[in-house]
Amino acid sequence: MADIVHLSSDAGRWIATLTDDRVTLDGNGTFVVRDAGEGRFTIQGSGDPQSVTGARAGRSIWIGVNGHAIEFRLEQVDEQAAAAGNDDASLRPPMAATVVRVAVAPGARVAAGDTLVVLEAMKMELPIRAPRDGVVRSVHCAEGQLVQPDMLLVELEP
């Protein structure tokens, strides 16, 4: 059984079909993905295998390739995956990371997609973005702090 996932990034939109260890993007390219442990993966398409890192937080998936981070946003997923993409999960680090910038303060109004906090992990910058419009209730991190995946970084009010 295949799962269909709609992805977007600053570079465009794709429909990914996921079957076993294969990902097919818009029916054009198929990639074999193998878990190498500790957030690392090997991806092979038509060329040589590439070693990449990956992390997920809420509706964002970060892929790190050669020191560059690409953020993909899940636009449409199956019901089980959608339940995992709640506000709370999207406001936590996807992996152990260092806070490099806190872009908001309590009381600030934010719109969906605004950057709240910028993290650095595995030589990648990982922006934590507002999952919806709201007001910042509190900020639970500071620049230079090491944060863990179970830590809530920012709380939003409706």
Image (tube, rainbow, N blue to C red):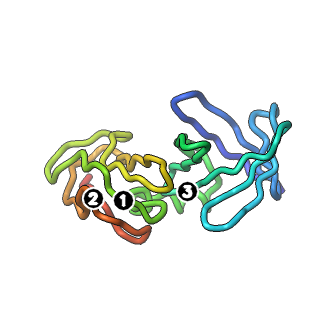
Asked whether the beta carbons under mark 1 and mark 2 sit within 8 Å of each other, the answer is: yes
Residue 55: numbered disc:
3
Kind of residue at badge 2: Gly
Other residues around mark 2 within 10 Å, as few (<14) / some (14–19) / many (≥20):
some
User: Quick one: SS at disc 3?
Assistant: strand
Q: How far apart are labels 3 and 1 at the CA level? A: 15 Å
The residue indicated by pointer 1 is: 98
Q: Tell which circle, 2 or 3, labels the residue nearer the N-terminal end.
A: 3
Q: Residues within 10 Å of mark 3 (few under 14, many from 20)?
A: some
Q: Residue at x 82, y 42 (%)?
A: 48
Q: Who's the residue at 54% across and 40% down the image? A: 68
Q: Amino acid at mark 3?
A: Ala
Proximity of marks 2 and 3: CB atoms separated by less than 8 Å: no
Name the mark nearer the viewer: 2 or 3: 2
The residue depicted at 17 percent of the width and 45 percent of the height is 108
Q: Is residue 14 left or right of residue 107?
A: right
Vertically, is 10 above or below 65? above
Pointer 1 local density, CA inside 10 Å: few below 14, some 14–19, many at least 20: many
Give how far apart the Cα atoms at labels 1 and 2 are.
Answer: 6 Å
Q: Position of residue 79 (x, y in %)?
A: 61, 58
Q: Position of residue 140 (x, y in %)?
A: 24, 64
